[in-house]
Amino acid sequence: MSLPYENTTSGEKALGEIQKLLRGFGCNKFGSMVDDSEGVIFIQFDWRGRECSVKASIKGYASAWLKAHPYSSRSRCSLKEYERKALDIASIAVYSILRDWIKGQITAIETGILSFEGAFLGQILLPNTTTTVLDAVMQREMLPALEQQKGSQP
């Protein structure tokens, strides 16, 4: 079974394209970072005073790739080498996924399908913190509380 983006080869090129997309959209600050210990890629940008941080899991994609391509004795390498291969594929694929996702969000904003907040709400950083709106919602368990609230209404 094939996994979307598993054969992409444009990791660093995709990062440059993300920066070009964001600049074209009016972002004047842009940065990226890889946290190898956590297995995540961060893309941060500022649009009209709204700071955003997009976080994507390399380990998550690698896990999906390993599920789609299970290790076997015919793999011609050790399990550890095979897992390293999955991480290498993932580190390239995730950049392309982020590029396409960000391009889709920007296109939705520019065409009036979504507001900036509608497109990037979960990635907006709270003032003077490194916490996103999504992180705050999850830490405070706001979604289950809202679902319980909805269920108790007549």
Image (cartoon, helix red, strand yellow):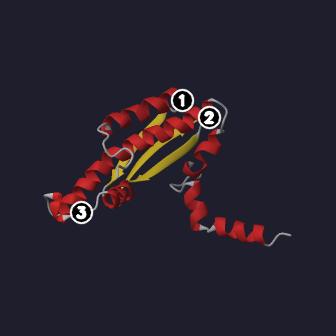
Tell me residue 17's x, y (percent): 40, 32
Q: Nearer the viewer, mark 3 or mark 2?
A: 3
Q: Residues within 10 Å of mark 1 (few under 14, many from 20)?
A: some
Look at the picture and state if 58 lies above or below 22: below
Q: Nearer the viewer, mark 1 or mark 2?
A: 2
Q: Nearer the viewer, residue 75 or 58?
A: 75
* C-beta proximity under 8 Å, tags 1 and 2: yes
Distance between the alpha carbons at the discs numbered 1 and 2? 10 Å
Q: Secondary structure at mark 1?
A: helix
Tell me residue 16's x, y (percent): 37, 33
Q: Looking at the rendered structure, which numbered label has been put on residue 25?
A: 1
- The amino acid at mark 2 is Ile
Look at the picture and state if 85 lies above or below 143: above
Occupied quadrant, residue 73: bottom left
Residue pointed to by mark 3: 71
Q: Which residue of the protein is positioned furthest toward the left in this rendering?
A: 76
Distance between the alpha carbons at the discs numbered 3 and 2? 42 Å
Q: Looking at the rendered structure, which numbered label has been put on residue 1?
A: none
Q: Looking at the rendered structure, which numbered label has been put on residue 109?
A: 2
